[in-house]
Image: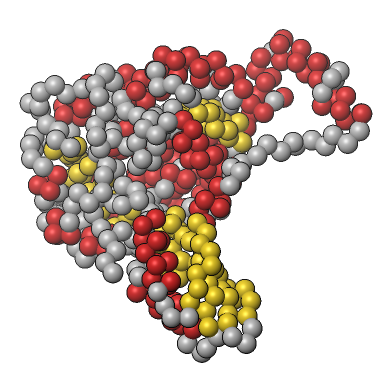
Amino acid sequence: MAITRLPSAGFSITIRISVTADASAIGRLTTCVGEAGAIVTALDVVDSDATQVIVDLTCDTADAAHADQVVKALTGLDGVNVRKVSDRTFLLHLGGKIEVSPKVALRNRDELSRAYTPGVARVCLAIAENPDDARRLTIKRNTVAVVSDGSAVLGLGNIGPAASLPVMEGKAALFKRFGGVDAWPVVLDTQDTDEIVSIVRAIAPQYGGINLEDIAAPRCFEIEARLRELLDIPVFHDDQHGTAICVLAALTNALRVVGKRLADVRVVVSGAGAAGTAIMKLLLRQGVGDIIACDRQGALHRGLADLNPAWQWLAENTNAANYAGDLAGAVRGADVFIGVSAPNLLTGDDIATMAPDSIVFALANPDPEVDPRDARKHAAVVATGRSDQPNQINNVLAFPGVFRGMLDAHAEEFTEEMAIAAAQAIADVVGEDKINPTVIVPSVFDPRVAPAVAAAVRAAAQSPAPRPAADPGPVDLPEIAQEAAAPASPLAD
């Protein structure tokens, strides 16, 4: 059975099976699953008697249709009775993934009188007299709003606020698990820019930071820019800045592996939406040799008509040779490919045309721009966004520590200096003596990552670094937000 998509834990199923009790029974089950293209991750004996064995077989599949095929293959085996199939992802989400838990005990009238009325009134009056005390005396000091309108959720597109909630819950859980930050989903039943800005501004007094999530370009640019102007707390669009931080960190170490300098390489970026634009601007600020931005219509170049302001800026500030062809042509001779767009845009043969010791970051999820197995035949370093592949570039490396640092510093804004400091911290966690082609970023479970990023961001917040001498111009990450006016790219993140 040919499976083009890679099996993953996101499509993990547990199958309860009754099978005849003979010496080859278990082997027949695992062989069948393997031949069906799935990966067995666990097999537990639940019960048995003289004639049968009941087992729970857990395996990773590629998608829902593949899971059905695996079950059908097992059902066709002699002596096998499939009793029940459980989708482990849906089981994990039952009832939601987060909850509110009090930090103080309320065991008697004495404690109730201090936590609530009448004692709480004194705290309210203190904050009324000095509003800055809200950071010290309320949840504001450690709480972030994860705000989305559901218009650009993962690779699913515009699925709306209710359908986006599982993602926002997951984001909140990651904030707590990796950064000790209390985050709460705020999904909005509107996709009107003015209304979103107004709502977030109105709820902001409760929060120490705003994390914008899965809002489609170009509206996300304007929403972020306006909120930055209106609020005295950091506003961070993770699809832009979290992705850019992680890519810069990974590229820093990948270049160390292949012995190249950022100033000497040509980078091709597929996807000129929110993530791609932020990546390119951060690389330009760091002095990259050259960048070609590609989207559905091909390379952005000077002379293209009817570009929106964001793309016009990219056309004028990238692509030194003014290449005007397609993506496959753009990667010929390139040192680095970064994909934040759509699946299966390139083949292994395309990667073979890149410069020697090339670097490929194919980050579209769940299916990358190029099959990583094919890319590894030709590229020196390959990374994806998948957790089941080496070199996973995942925003969880950045945003928990970034917000931890900003909250601890009582920062009022997110800055480019913080982004650069965070990227360097992530890269340095690996250690120059540890990096190799399959280890260019730390594990998302490495306990050193979030504290290192938080410390770097805190230091940047307290002592902002000067602009480097090789400043490519006014390309601060937040400024792109003021350029939006035209429809988003079909490949936008």
Q: Give residue 157's position: percent from left, percent from top.
A: 34, 36
What colour scheme has been applied to the protein in the rendered image? secondary structure
Pick out the residue farthest to the right: 109
Q: Quadrant of the C terminus?
A: top left
Name the residue rendered at 78%, 18% in the picture: 123
Figure quadrant of residue 308: top left
Q: Give residue 213's position: percent from left, percent from top.
A: 44, 33
Name the residue rendered at 16%, 24% in the picture: 307
Q: Above or below — where is 442 with respect to 180?
A: below
Name the residue rendered at 48%, 81% in the picture: 79
Name the residue rendered at 25%, 37% in the picture: 491
Figure quadrant of residue 108: top right
Q: Give residue 385's position: percent from left, percent from top.
A: 36, 51
Q: Quadrant of the N terminus?
A: bottom left
Left or right, 474 with reference to 204: left
Q: How many marks?
A: 0
Q: Give residue 223's position: percent from left, percent from top.
A: 40, 21
Left or right, 152 with reference to 327: right
Q: Above or below — where is 262 with respect to 216?
A: below
Q: Above or below — where is 227 with respect to 142?
A: above
Along the viewing direction, whichever of 414 and 33 lies nearer the viewer? 33
Pick out the residue farthest to the top: 129
Left or right, 146 with reference to 32: right
Along the viewing direction, whichever of 67 and 367 lies nearer the viewer? 67
Q: Is residue 27 visible?
A: yes
Along the viewing direction, whichever of 351 and 184 lies nearer the viewer? 184
Q: Is residue 251 visible?
A: no
Pick out the residue farthest to the bottom: 23
